[in-house]
């Protein structure tokens, strides 16, 4: 008995000693802020891992967050805006026919490996993209090239807007297009079109996507040697621990980064990110839940709200797409515009914006935010009016119409922080107006996205965050024709030749002012045709610790971390 | 003994074959596919079709399975569609983390569980006994993720004593020759790094160890209660052996057989991936990666990881069987 007491005392002593030691270690763990004199390590909590460190082979925001710190494009999004600004090109000039763009490049710029940045490097990059072959042509790999430029040198049957790139002199690059598109040059602000060092691309075989034929393996360039001109360069990418460590590039051509080291740590779980910030383990994180904002602000953290550059909408399936399975049972009533108008009038979008979305969210009148050129102030609007909804439904003889309403679970998107709650409100609104709702909840990816894009839903919740400052990137993505003259988005299930013709004309218009008018007309027509109901534009937020300054929130989530400094 | 080990290892072959067929069919029966998961909400019908084709998923199941087997015989488990790296690389980079976490959870469960179960049995019907039964019931029923948040809130956020996520402070530039961070720090004489890795194991180890702890307490208690009433204990007492000798050599040692079986099974389970704990603590092990792989329909990773984990599970249980012989000389494995 005596002995076991002694043992217990021993165990207790060891436990106390361990806790005391851990408390000491805590002071070591508190952040390295460099004493507020331009140094230190900034640790940012991301929700997911980057897919690759070669931005040309990436299509996702988590990758671009990292690559934007290491790479720069000819054009860059403006600070805190989506508007294209000079990047590695000091200026550019478009020919009158809109087919030739001449870029004047910055002087004295070097890649991280010491290679000079010049017109030849620009053309090396464009030629690289255009000449991709094999696995590199997979949409999962080179999605943005295909979205913006179309096909490749080896796919002449695919429409393609890139013609050539030539180096007129050391600092003048000329890019020729096969046809005019409003997407160019705004799309050059995408991180996918950032400039890589030609030397490093060749040395580390960037385009050799090896591995089995079932899945491409990343090149050594994408894993270990991404080489751009940006303010940070890669130190280490620890995939198994979800950590990317970047260090300051001391030969950067612009203002040097405010911190010596920048670490992106993947913490998938939102609550864990919040607790890690509160515990001082990280200095900031993204995808702040709207419900946490007040708590974080009370705790002294700086919540940075991005300008809303997204759209949440209720998709309506008109059932006219050939891809929709015949047994999907899409309600034919949705082909009647009065029924779609009834849905629009039934939804209390003000209530959603006021109670379920963060401060600064707005009711959407059309499928793009007002900062994008082509936004129309003359669209038909659909105020919350249950009586009007009921009247329209009666007029269409569709009272009691059953709608399969799909909504996603286990997901929070920048435009849709809590899909379940939004579904509840809309579902109740539609029931009040005389619809019968059949709710179908599915896990976001791939189940939900798959079901919705297969045309199984009568109505569903989805949204979009803009990639760059162009109307087509919003409404063209949703409503332009596919090659067969069918709506591009599979859920849309409609054919509207008039809209498709207008899209072709607007995208091919070289004069920006004329193009703006064409997109305004398109927005007006879309809101009359009502292929879906735009709900809201919601400003997503990120948060940093109290002692962090200089981070400017970007509507494109294209934050530049080189401006970050610690204030103590 | 050797024959026993060889026989058990040979039994692995049909197990793995059956498992691979089941997995193959099950994974492909899931709705959605890797193409959709890879492309996300920006996917179009064309891009999904193109990616599905490039992943070889348009071939018949039999052809796909044949390709999988062919690779398997070359010790090639394929490439992760999530990361573009070989499945074996992904596994062996993450497995050490899971082993460390399992070890931490088991050390906690064993060091606390066996004495507690033993004491509860010795004080059968007393307050300590009732308390340990209640506590172990609570341990089994409290959801791991709830406990994880609670532990982190108290010890990481409020008290600031322990780190709340990850395997090591990201600001430490540790070198990792083996991938076992605690060991790496000792090998490279970076003792700070080693200590930091130990600290990072405490909270997830506690969260993960709660269920095994509760089970070990209950099994130990029941087993000791069985053994104390055995004839040989009465004989030992009547022989006048010292109480401590009877407890250590006769009661505890004999009571340990079912406990060893339990520990073995729990080790296998914990090594198979503590999905929730690893996710909540952003702990880079196999569990969190398997969770991502399920979401991403990363067939190669799921097939490869589950097969490798099945091998681990069988090996751990083999070790447990061998340990029986050490605990009880009457048991000889053949």
Image (cartoon, coloured by chain):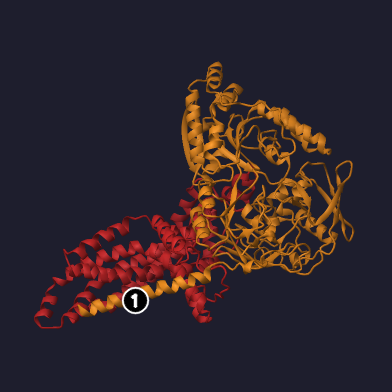
Chain colours: A orange, B red
From the viewer's perspective, tell me whether residue A193 is left or right of residue A44. right
- Chain letter of disc 1? A
- The quadrant holding residue B129 is bottom left
Q: Nearer the viewer, residue A334 or A116?
A: A116
Query: x and y percent of residue B209 in the render?
Result: 36, 64
Q: Quadrant of the N terminus of chain B?
A: bottom left
Query: x and y percent of residue A443 in the render?
Result: 49, 45
- The quadrant holding residue A123 is bottom right
From the viewer's perspective, tell me whether residue B57 is left or right of residue A56. left
* Residue displayed at 50% across by 36% down: A423
Q: Is residue A407 visible?
A: yes
User: Circle 1 sits on which residue?
Assistant: A13
* Residue displayed at 66% across by 26% down: A380
- Number of numbered labels in the structure image: 1
Query: x and y percent of residue A378 in the render?
Result: 71, 27
Give SS at disc 1. Answer: helix
Q: Quadrant of the C terminus of chain B?
A: bottom left
Above or below, A159 relative to A120: above
């Amino acid at each position: 008995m005596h002995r076991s007491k002694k043992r217990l005392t021993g165990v207790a002593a060891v436990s106390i000693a361990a806790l005391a030691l851990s408390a000491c270690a805590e002071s070591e763990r508190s952040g390295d802020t460099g004493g507020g004199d331009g140094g230190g390590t900034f640790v940012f909590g991301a929700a997911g891992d980057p897919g690759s460190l070669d931005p040309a082979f990436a299509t996702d925001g988590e990758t671009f967050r990292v690559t934007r710190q290491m790479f720069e494009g000819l054009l860059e999004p403006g600070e805190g805006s989506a508007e294209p600004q000079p990047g590695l090109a000091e200026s550019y000039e478009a020919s009158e026919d809109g087919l030739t763009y001449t870029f004047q490049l910055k002087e004295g710029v070097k890649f991280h490996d010491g290679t000079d940045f010049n017109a030849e490097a620009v053309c090396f990059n464009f030629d690289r993209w255009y000449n991709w072959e094999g696995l590199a042509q997979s949409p999962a790999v080179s999605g943005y090239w295909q979205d913006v430029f179309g096909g490749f040198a080896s796919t002449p049957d695919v429409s393609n807007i890139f013609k050539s790139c030539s180096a007129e002199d050391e600092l003048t690059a000329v890019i020729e297009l096969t046809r005019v598109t409003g997407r160019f040059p705004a799309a050059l602000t995408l991180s996918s079109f950032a400039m890589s060092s030609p030397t490093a691309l060749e040395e580390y075989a960037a385009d050799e996507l090896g591995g089995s034929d079932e899945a491409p393996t990343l090149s050594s360039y994408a894993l270990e040697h991404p080489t751009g001109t940006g303010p940070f360069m890669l130190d280490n990418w620890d995939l198994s621990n979800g950590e990317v460590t970047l260090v300051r590039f001391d030969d950067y051509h612009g203002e040097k980064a405010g911190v010596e080291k920048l670490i992106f740590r993947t913490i998938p779980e939102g609550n864990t990110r919040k607790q890690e910030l509160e515990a001082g383990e990280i200095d900031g994180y993204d995808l702040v839940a709207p419900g946490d904002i007040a708590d974080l602000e009370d705790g002294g953290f700086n919540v940075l709200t991005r300008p809303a550059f997204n759209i949440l909408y209720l998709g309506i399936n008109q059932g006219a797409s050939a891809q929709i399975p015949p047994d999907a049972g899409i309600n034919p009533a949705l082909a009647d515009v009065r029924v779609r108008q009834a849905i629009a009038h039934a939804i209390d979008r003000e209530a959603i914006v006021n109670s379920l979305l963060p401060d600064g969210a707005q009711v959407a009148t059309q499928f793009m935010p007002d900062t994008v050129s082509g936004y129309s102030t003359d669209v038909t609007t659909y105020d919350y009016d249950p009586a009007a909804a009921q009247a329209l439904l009666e007029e269409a003889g569709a009272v009691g119409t059953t709608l399969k309403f799909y909504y996603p679970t286990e997901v929070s998107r920048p435009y849709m922080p809590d899909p379940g709650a939004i579904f509840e409100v809309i579902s109740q609104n539609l029931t009040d107006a005389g619809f019968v709702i059949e709710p179908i909840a599915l896990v976001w990816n791939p189940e939900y996205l798959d079901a919705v894009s297969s045309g199984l839903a009568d109505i569903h919740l989805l949204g979009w965050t803009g990639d760059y400052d162009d109307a087509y990137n919003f409404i063209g993505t949703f409503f332009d024709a596919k090659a067969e003259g069918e709506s591009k988005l599979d859920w849309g299930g409609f054919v509207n030749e008039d809209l498709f013709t207008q899209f072709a004309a607007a995208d091919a218009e070289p004069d920006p002012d004329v193009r703006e008018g064409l997109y305004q007309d398109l927005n007006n027509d879309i809101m009359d045709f009502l292929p879906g109901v735009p709900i809201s534009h919601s400003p997503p937020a990120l948060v940093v610790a109290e002692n962090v300054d200089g981070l400017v929130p970007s509507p494109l989530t294209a934050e530049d971390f080189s401006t970050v400094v610690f204030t103590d | 003994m050797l024959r026993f080990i060889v026989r058990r290892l040979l039994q692995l072959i049909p197990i793995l074959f059956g498992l691979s067929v089941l997995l193959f069919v099950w994974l492909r029966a899931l709705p959605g596919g890797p193409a959709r998961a890879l492309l996300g909400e920006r996917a179009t019908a064309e891009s999904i079709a193109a990616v599905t084709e490039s992943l070889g998923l348009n071939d018949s199941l039999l052809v796909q399975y044949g390709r999988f087997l062919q690779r398997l015989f070359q010790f090639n488990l394929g490439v992760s569609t999530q990361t573009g790296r070989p499945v074996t690389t992904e596994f062996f980079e993450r497995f050490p983390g899971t082993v460390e976490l399992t070890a931490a959870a088991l050390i906690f469960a064993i060091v606390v569980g066996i004495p507690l179960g033993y004491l509860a049995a010795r004080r059968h019907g007393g307050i300590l006994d009732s308390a340990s039964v209640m506590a172990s019931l609570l341990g089994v029923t409290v959801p791991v993720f709830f406990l994880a948040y609670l532990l982190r809130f108290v010890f990481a956020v409020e008290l600031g004593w322990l780190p709340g996520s990850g395997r090591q402070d990201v600001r430490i530039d540790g070198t990792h020759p083996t991938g076992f961070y605690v060991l790496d720090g000792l090998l490279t004489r970076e003792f700070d790094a080693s200590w930091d890795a130990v600290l990072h194991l405490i909270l997830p180890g506690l969260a993960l160890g709660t269920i095994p702890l509760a089970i070990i307490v209950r099994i130990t208690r029941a087993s000791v209660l069985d053994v104390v009433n055995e004839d040989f204990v009465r004989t030992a007492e009547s022989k006048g052996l010292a109480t401590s000798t009877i407890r250590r050599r006769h009661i505890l040692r004999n009571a340990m057989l079912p406990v060893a079986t339990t520990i073995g099974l729990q080790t296998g389970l914990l090594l198979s991936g503590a999905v929730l704990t690893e996710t909540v603590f952003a702990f880079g092990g196999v569990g969190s990666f398997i969770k991502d792989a399920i979401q991403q329909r990363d067939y190669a990773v799921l097939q490869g990881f589950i097969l490798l984990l099945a091998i681990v599970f069988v090996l751990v249980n083999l070790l447990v069987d061998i340990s029986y012989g050490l605990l009880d000389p009457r048991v000889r494995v053949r």
